[in-house]
Amino acid sequence: MRFVLYISEYLIPLVFIYIVGFGLISKVPLFDEFIEGAKDGFKVVFSIMPTLIGLMVAVGILRASGALDFLTMIITPVTNILKFPSEIVPIALMRTVSSSATTGLVLDLFKTYGPDSLIGRMTSIMMGCTETIFYTLSVYFLAINIRKTRYTITGALLANLAGIVFSVYITYSLFG
C-alpha cells in the first residue's frame, strides 16, 4: 500500500514534467498552446453556464420550497414496503440532478445518523453506485453540441435505478 501512495505522490509532477519535456523536444510553443487551450476551455464554460445555472436554481428551489420533502413523504409508503429507508429517498431523488446538493444531504445524514450507521453506509454505497445524470448530460452534450439525447436519458436513469437497488441490497447483505 505504501508503494501505491509513494507512486501517487509523484505521478502528477512526473506527468507534468513529461508533457513539458515532450513539448520542448518536439519544439512546440508550449505557452501559446496553453493559452489556446485555456481559451477553448473558457468557450466551453460560457456555452454550458446557462444550463448549469438553471440546474442549480432548480435544485435550490426544490430544497427551499419543501418540494423534496413532499416527494419523500409521498414515496415513503412504497419505500417502506421495499425496506428502503425513507431518510435516503431525498438522496436517491437528488442524485440524478446535482452532486453538490446530494453531498449536502449526505452530510446532513452523516451528522444525524453517523457514517458508520446502516443509513450512512447505504448512502455511501449509493453515492458510489449512482451518477448525476442531468448535470453530466448537460455539460458533455452541450460541450459537443448534441441536441437529441435519444435513449441516453432512459438508459442512464435505468442504470441509476439499478445502482440504487443494488446499493440497498449490498448494504443489507454486508451490514444488515
Image: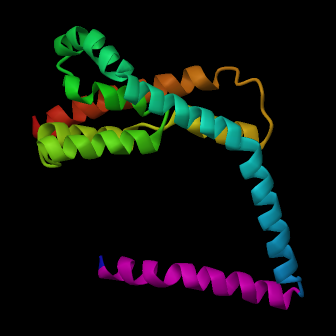
Give the x, y percent position of residue 142.
Answer: 74, 38
Give the x, y percent position of residue 48.
Answer: 71, 42
Q: Is residue 85 above or below residue 109?
A: above
Majority secondary structure in the magenta region = helix
Q: Which residue is pictured at 57% across the width and 37% down the height?
A: 135
Q: Which residue is pictured at 72% across the width and 51% down the height?
A: 45
Give the x, y percent position of residue 36.
Answer: 85, 68
Task: Tally the numbered discs.
Answer: 0
Apparent side of residue 152 relative to residue 74 in the rendered image (left or right): right
- Tell me if residue 96 can be seen: no
Quarter that holds the C terminus: top left
Looking at the rendering, the stretch of residues picked out in magenta corresponds to: 2-26
- Tell me if residue 111 can be seen: yes
Q: Is residue 46 above or below residue 133?
A: below
Q: Which residue is pictured at 24% across the width and 9% down the height?
A: 78
Quarter that holds the N terminus: bottom left
Give the x, y percent position of residue 121.
Answer: 20, 43
Apparent side of residue 92 relative to residue 55 in the rendered image (left or right): left
Q: How is colour applied across the structure in the image?
A: rainbow
Asked if the stretch drawn in magenta spans residue 139, the answer is: no
Apparent side of residue 21 relative to residue 120 in the rendered image (left or right): right
Q: Is residue 82 above or below residue 22?
A: above
Q: Quadrant of residue 37?
A: bottom right
Asked if the stretch drawn in magenta spans residue 21, the answer is: yes
Q: Which residue is pictured at 23% across the width and 37% down the height?
A: 122
